[in-house]
Amino acid sequence: MTVSKLATVSKYSWQRGGNFGQIARKPINKLVLHHNAGTGSGVVPNCWVGRQASAHYQIENGTIISCLDEDITAWHCGASGVDNNSHTIGIEHQNSTGAPDWKVSAENQEKSAQLVAEICKRRGIPIDRNHIVRHREMPNCQTACSGGLDIDWIVNRAKEIAGEATASSSSKTKEINEEEIMKIIKLPNNATYYLVRSTGVTTLTAQEWIGVKRVLGFKDSDVDTVNQAEFDGIKSALGKK
Ligand SMILES: [Zn+2]
C-alpha cells in the first residue's frame, strides 16, 4: 500500500464504493490535477460511492485527504479509446469560488504543491508541466477540469519545495551580485521579475526567480509590485545614468 505521508486517510470514502481498480496498475508517470466544480467539503469523495469515479487524493480546507491507495488504479480521467488511468495519480481540489472562475484557494494550492513535490520525489517523476497536467490535457478528455486551478504556480512551487532550481536560474544567479540589487519589482498580472541594479535591469521568468530567490535568500515579500508609470520611471532613471 502506498499513501503520501502528508495525507490523512479519508473520513469520506477510503476505498469504499468499489468504483476503482479493475485496471492493472502500470508505472506512474503523470499526476493529473482536477477541481471539484464545487466549494463544499466531502461532496466529491462522497459521490464516488455511487458514481463510477474515484481519485487518489482530495485537497479541501487546507487538508490533504487520501481516498485511495496509490497502488490501485483510480477512475479519474478515463476516456474512450485510451488508457489514461493505469499510469496516473488523480488529485482533486475543492474550489474557493463557483462558476465561471472556479478558483482554488491559496491554502489548497500550497497543499497541492507539497503533495506534488512529495509524490514526484518519492517516485522519481520530473516536476514539470509534461508530468503534472490538468484533466483536460489528458488524451480524449472533453472537460473544462481543472477550472481556475493555477497549475503553473503549483508546479513552480513544487519545484521550489523539492529544492530544484532550473539550469537557467543557476546561471542567472551567477551573474547577479547580491549587493548590486537596488530593488526587485514586477508589474501586476505579469509573471516577469525585474532585478533593478545600479548597472541596469535583469529580467527573470517566474521559474528563474524561484532559483535566484532561494540561492540569494530573497523572499516574495521583497518584491515591489509597481504600476506601468512607476516601472517606466525606474527604467528611464537608470537610462539617464
Ligand atoms: Zn477532472
Image (cartoon, grey):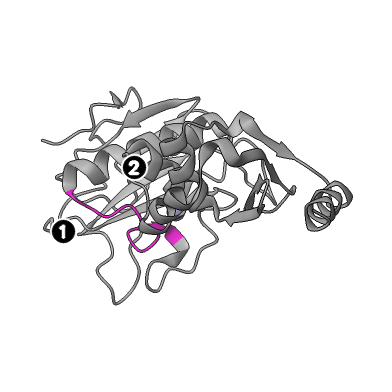
Residue drawn at the location 34% of the way across and 42% of the way down: 116
User: Does mark 1's beta carbon lie closer than 8 Å to ligand 1?
Assistant: no
Query: How far is the residue under mark 1 from the one under mark 2?
Result: 23 Å
Instruction: Give the SS element for disc 1.
Output: loop
Q: Position of residue 161 (x, y in %)?
A: 36, 36
Q: Position of residue 144 (x, y in %)?
A: 55, 61
Q: Is residue 234 magenta?
A: no
Task: Identify whether 182 is placed above or below 21.
Answer: above
Q: Quadrant of ligand 1?
A: bottom left
Q: Which residue is mark 1?
A: 23
Q: Residues within 10 Å of mark 2 (few under 14, many from 20)?
A: many
Q: Measuring 68% from the left and 49% from the top, which residue is drawn there?
A: 101
Question: Residue 181's image quarter?
Answer: top right
Residue appearing at x 33%, y 63% in the figure: 78
What amino acid does circle 2 point to?
Val
Instruction: Report which residue position mark 2 lands on.
Output: 116
What range is drawn magenta here? 124-135
Classify 10 Å Cα crowding around label 1: few (below 14), some (14-19), many (20 and above): some
Residue 201 is labelled as: none
On the rendered structure, is 25 left or right of 12? left
Residue 18 seen from this side = no
Coordinates of residue 148 in the picture (x, y in percent):
60, 50
Q: Residue type at mark 1?
A: Ile
Task: Name which of mark 1 and mark 2 comes first in the sequence.
Answer: 1
The picture places residue 60, in percent across and down from the top left corner, at: 47, 30
